[in-house]
Image (cartoon, helix red, strand yellow):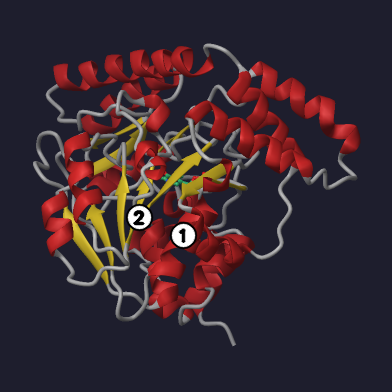
């Protein structure tokens, strides 16, 4: 029989998200369920991204590029076929563009799966996962499945550059299975210096894996770490088409690493042919000249305007080089998030290590204007006026991205 908490969570998360989170672990007992999620879970809701401003899930409001959309339309009549050769064409194109051996590249439907599989393959009860805090939580959810200890290392210089504290991460465990570096980091949008990542590559134990998540790399000025794959180091780099390329719903990504490392993660996904719509859109995106610099510039301009506005109002933000940043609201952040949601402005979550900060995704210029106006209204009101959001809808996204 289901407990009331079970029932509440089932109503708050999509069926798929619920089973994913519960899988393998001792279900709810192993889940980091917060008070806020339980509060949201208790309310009836419906997910409708067409209502309100959604700057909560680090999505790209521009969506797929025009060439990618056309490619999807063009391939639709062939949707009855697996078209297996498309996967090789896509990975070969990416490998050629990046100067990689095609054997070092495997395509997945997004980067979440290879992230999960890497943690499953290389951590265990005796091989911990080492992560930065605040950082993207997905590796820790995978470690709950593998039973690995999770060692959280606070970001260095939290009120300044907010970078990964590489030396502390290396010192956290004598026998780590995976060290996870997200560059730029989710949720802070901050970049860890290349020299520090180089140090991590040089010092990570030979039987461990440095998992470098470059989901947001195209949005930043950070150099890519793909060169460590070319040098056959024990790294796995993740790339996705969900962020700059605007394909979060279409689903395409890569794991890039030495073939012997990839051979440990690929079988965990089983035989799972990739969607031909996503493959053709990814290929068209890679071939579209100027797409990366022009989108990067658009998002950077809106981000910088937003950061400057908050600074002018006396609110601290992280020095982001990505499409998200942390905003210190100088009071418990969750009620502020809920008050914004009550006004149909859906912002990102709070991380327990930084309880007065919220993650904000850079949306369109109009969306950010509405967000700023609504933020001022909320901050000038008292917390007593905060009412529950009418449709808290995207609680599972707050956990997942
Ligand atoms: C740092 C990071 N890695 C990986 C992902 C997974 O994205 P996807 O599976 O859409 O590629 C996300 C999603 O937000 C993310 O923020």
Specify whether tag 1 is near ligand 1 (CB below 8 Å): no
Classed neighbour count for the residue bearing mark 2: other residues with Cα under 10 Å, few (<14), some (14–19), many (≥20)? many
Q: Which mark is residue 261?
A: 1
Q: Is residue 308 above or below residue 276?
A: above
Specify whether tag 2 is near ligand 1 (CB below 8 Å): no
Report if the CB atoms under discs 2 and 1 are less than 8 Å apart.
yes
Q: From mark 2 to mark 1, how far is it between C-alphas?
A: 8 Å
Find residue 227 and report its horizontal and vertical position in percent: 36, 37
Element class at badge 2: loop
Q: Residue at x 23, y 43 (%)?
A: 197
| First reached walking from the N terminus: tag 2 or tag 1 | 2
Task: Tell me the quarter of the image containing the N terminus.
Answer: bottom right
Side of 18 where 70 appears, left or right: right
Q: Is residue 8 above or below residue 316?
A: below
Find residue 367 and report its horizontal and vertical position in percent: 44, 21
- Is residue 392 something one can see in this rendering? no
Q: Quadrant of residue 283?
A: top right
Find residue 291 and report its horizontal and vertical position in percent: 53, 16
Q: Which mark is residue 234?
A: 2
């Amino acid at each position: 029989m289901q407990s009331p908490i079970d029932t509440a969570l089932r109503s708050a998360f999509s069926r798929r998200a619920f089973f994913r989170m519960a899988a393998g672990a001792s279900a709810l007992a192993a889940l980091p369920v917060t008070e806020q999620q339980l509060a949201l879970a208790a309310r009836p809701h419906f997910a409708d991204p067409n209502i309100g401003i959604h700057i909560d899930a680090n999505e790209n409001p521009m969506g797929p590029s025009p060439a990618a959309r056309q490619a999807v339309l063009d391939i639709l009549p062939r949707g009855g076929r697996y078209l297996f050769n498309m996967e090789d064409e896509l990975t070969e194109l990416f490998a050629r563009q990046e100067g990689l051996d095609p054997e070092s590249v495997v395509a997945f439907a997004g980067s979440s799966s290879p992230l999960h599989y890497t943690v499953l393959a290389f951590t265990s009860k005796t091989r911990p996962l080492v992560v930065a805090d605040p950082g993207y939580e997905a590796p820790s959810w995978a470690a709950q499945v593998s039973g690995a200890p999770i060692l959280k290392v606070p970001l260095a210089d939290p009120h300044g550059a907010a970078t990964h504290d590489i030396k502390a991460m290396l010192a956290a465990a004598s026998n780590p299975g995976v060290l996870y570096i997200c560059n730029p980091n989710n949720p802070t949008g901050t970049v860890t210096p290349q020299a520090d990542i180089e140090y991590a590559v040089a010092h990570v134990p030979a039987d461990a894996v440095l998992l470098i998540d470059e989901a947001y790399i195209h949005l930043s000025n950070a150099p890519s770490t793909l060169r460590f794959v070319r040098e056959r180091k024990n790294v796995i780099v993740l790339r996705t088409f969900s962020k700059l390329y605007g394909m979060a719903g279409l689903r395409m990504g890569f794991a890039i690493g030495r073939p012997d490392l990839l051979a440990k993660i690929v079988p965990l996904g089983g035989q799972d042919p990739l969607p031909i719509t996503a493959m053709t859109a990814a290929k068209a995106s890679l071939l579209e000249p100027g797409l990366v610099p022009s989108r990067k510039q658009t998002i950077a301009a809106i981000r910088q305007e937003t950061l400057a506005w908050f600074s002018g109002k006396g609110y601290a933000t992280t020095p982001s080089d990505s499409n998200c940043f942390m905003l210190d609201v100088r009071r418990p952040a969750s009620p502020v998030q809920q008050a914004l949601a009550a006004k149909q402005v859906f912002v990102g979550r709070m991380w327990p290590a930084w309880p007065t900060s919220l993650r904000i995704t850079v949306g369109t210029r109009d969306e950010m204007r509405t967000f700023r106006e609504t933020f001022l209204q909320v901050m000038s009101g008292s917390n007593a006026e905060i009412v529950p959001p009418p449709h808290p809808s995207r609680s599972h996204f707050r956990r997942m991205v």
